[in-house]
Amino acid sequence: MHKDSFTIAPFQYITVDHPEMTHAQQAARAYSAGCQWVQIRIKDKPLNEIEREVVQALESALAYNAVLIVDDYVSLAEKCKASGVHLGKLDMSPTEARQILGNHCIIGATANTFDDIRQITTMPVDYIGVGPFRFTRTKKKLSPIIGIEGYRSLMKHVREARLTIPIIAIGGITYEDLPALIDTGVYGVAVSGAVAYSHSFEKSIEKFVEFFTKTGQFYDTGVSLKV
């Protein structure tokens, strides 16, 4: 792994296609409510539309000295000078992405099994999103559901293998799931629907942030955005 110049946030918000908010608006509202890490995830849209959302979201990220991760689009993350990129199993390889983005950018990858995790740790990746925890309507083509016992088993294998990369649980996670999930040993969570479709977007963000603040997780990411 490249030089350790930042801390991965234990609470991450992932934007969704929402009928009343653009992705950039979601990012701005998340940052204003205390979230320090947003992944902008846009599928099936023209690249120029995605770029416009990323540029607008990045303005908010800079204003709050926060992290903006772009899902999938490595070239767009590099062009817009985002904090980094998150890569799915079928996306560009982390090794190729690192060559394009350099060592100063954050790269996350997706896993569903321990074999996935072990393979990813051989690559230049900074954190791994592992899921789905349960069924979620915010993502198509789901991998097999992991569930709480699945995370317990995965994290047991991670500890036995002495792997230290941050594991972020993802997929249908709600606020009520946090104690049990964190008890499995995962580093943190990434959330979409539980915030985006809640009665109060900002209050939901604040609840998640407060949980990780109280658990003693170091919440300030300490990341300086690429300029």
Image: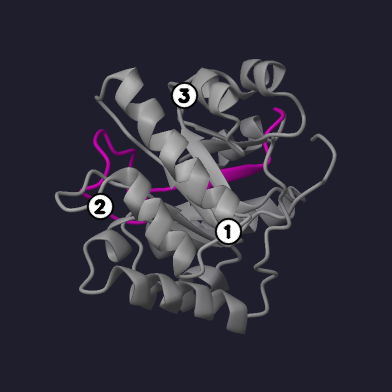
Residue that sits furthest to the left in the current view: 19
Residue holding disc 2: 135
Magenta segment range? 123-145
The answer to whether any part of residue 113 appears in the image is no
* Horizontal relation, residue 227 to residue 212: left or right: right
* Horizontal relation, residue 195 to residue 39: left or right: left
Q: How many C-alpha atoms fall within 10 Å of the one at disc 1: few (<14), some, or many (≥20)?
A: some
Q: Residue 134 lies in what quarter of the image?
A: bottom left
Q: Quadrant of the C terminus?
A: top right
Residue holding disc 3: 73
> In the image, residue 2 lies at what x, y percent?
81, 34
Q: Are marks 3 and 2 in contact (CB under 8 Å)?
A: no
> In the image, residue 137 lies at what x, y percent?
20, 48
Q: Alpha-carbon distance for marks 3 and 2?
A: 25 Å
Q: Which amino acid does label 3 sit on?
A: Tyr
Residue at image position (37%, 30%) is 52
Q: Looking at the image, is mark 1 or mark 3 earlier in the sequence?
A: 1
Whether 174 is drawn above or below 37: the answer is below
Q: Residue 188 lies in what quarter of the image?
A: bottom right
Asked whether 61 or 106 is in front, the reply is 61
Q: Looking at the image, is mark 1 or mark 2 earlier in the sequence?
A: 1
Residue at image position (72%, 47%) is 224
Residue holding disc 1: 64
> In the image, residue 190 lies at what x, y percent?
45, 56
Q: Alpha-carbon distance for marks 1 and 3?
A: 23 Å
- SS for tag 3? loop
Q: How many C-alpha atoms fall within 10 Å of the one at disc 3: few (<14), some, or many (≥20)?
A: many
Q: Do the residues labelled 1 and 3 touch (CB within 8 Å)?
A: no
Mark 3 vs mark 2, foreground winner is 3
Q: What residue type is labelled 1?
A: Tyr
> In the image, residue 193 lies at what x, y percent?
27, 58
